[in-house]
Amino acid sequence: MSTQNPTAVRVYLARVRSALADLPESEVEEILEDVRPHLAEMEAELGEHPKVDALIERLGSPESYAAELRASGGYPPRPAEAGDKTTVLKVKTGIGGARFALWGLVFAVGGFALFGFAAAVLIRVEPLLGLLFVAPVLAISVVHVVRRGVAPIAELPEVVKLREIVGSFHKDRNSKGLNYFRTLKPAWWVLCAAVLVVFGLLLVLRETEAVLLLPLMLLAAVAVVWAGPKLKGDRRLLWLAVPISAFVIGGMLGGAGAAVDLIAKRSYGDNSYNTPNNHSNYGYGGNPLLMYGSQDVENIYAFDGEGKPLTGIYLYDEDGRPLSTTRYACEKSTGEKRKIGDDNRYPRPQIERGVQDGDGNRDGYNGYRSYCQEETEVPFSAAIPKGAPVPPSSSVPPPSSPTQPPR
């Protein structure tokens, strides 16, 4: 950067210096030395001989930029700012749009984190469809920031107050912990990109339809690596990097929760039944549940050779392991269906639930309380094929060793 003629960066920094004039001169010089390379790089991006207004559009006014430097460095706010309310509200035009852009970013951060968490827990694409409700708000906020810059937003009362709070928590600018986390910023953007790529690949492995989503994940990974290091020089990029970071944080928390849940399920032991999709299915207390295809079996009915239903039977496999399913019962006090455990005794009562009015009528949904009833009758009849062999009772060998007593 040439120092022979005043440039946009020099003019901008002169105003920043004036806004920091209450600080010790050595501290001001250190602050300016930190930001000067970023401003010079931005000046080069804006082309030959850019105007100060171009920098203001990208960074906000020098005064608001100086206030951000104070907050990030842990310095107290400028004394004039505490009593001069006109400084805070000097940009009255477009204040509604600035506030929408600010809270649109906050809304997007919450939405991206929430749906990223849900998608990671389920490892499915469907939760990501919720981002369709968040994206329009974020898009409108981005348009406003691109057109108007961050200056109106930096001068909102809530932003000024936030800077004061942040500054009060970081009074010691030379804090080792704070400086250490600052050095981790480049690694964070790389980590975000890696998580996005891995998450996209996992979704593709789980659902082939997710291959359409993979390019968006890759694009977001490239965007966060590009925008992250430039945040200090262009605050508008916050509207890109921060929602992606929130998505990554939500996804990592959801993935951690899913991993803990998977480890907890597998810790019950090796006596498990696997479905055709190679997924172990466990019930109450860690007992393996009986599956038919890919569906849980909740009840089993057995009939003799004459088509008469059998009751109180116990089922085992060839190794003597009980073929268990989840047993439910009615909660008499609340009329709700509740799980009471797993066992291999069949058939079990069918649970009928609904609502009824004061006269006990169960038709329609004008009822005032719910009911739960256990039906013990077999809900169907079985047609046993004629001529089916019926072994005599004497030919049935007794069990070698009972593995579960009758209940």
Image (tube, grey):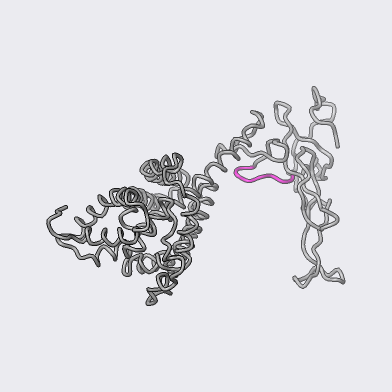
Counting from the top left corner in percent of width and height, residue 325 is at: 72, 41
> Magenta stretch: residue 294 in it?
yes
Q: Is residue 39 left or right of residue 172?
A: left
Q: Residue furthest top?
A: 400
Q: Residue furthest right?
A: 359
From the viewer's side, name the closer residue of 4 and 310.
Answer: 4
From the viewer's side, name the closer residue of 277 and 103.
Answer: 103
- The residue under the point 74% across, 45% down is 299
Number of numbered discs: 0
Residue 201 visible from this viewpoint = no
Q: Is residue 124 left or right of residue 334?
A: left
Q: Is residue 138 above or below residue 328?
A: below
Counting from the top left corner in percent of width and height, residue 151 is at: 35, 66
Counting from the top left corner in percent of width and height, residue 339 is at: 76, 47
From the viewer's side, name the closer residue of 179 and 132.
Answer: 179
Counting from the top left corner in percent of width and height, residue 131 is at: 46, 60
From the viewer's side, name the closer residue of 259 and 348.
Answer: 259
Q: Residue furthest bottom?
A: 93
Q: Is residue 274 above or below residue 394?
A: below
In magenta, the rendered stretch is 292-299
* Residue 406 occupies quadrant: top right
Residue 94 visible from this viewpoint = yes
> Magenta stretch: residue 297 in it?
yes
Quadrant, the C terminus: top right
- The residue under the point 71% across, 31% down is 317
Judged by its main secondary structure, the magenta piece is: loop
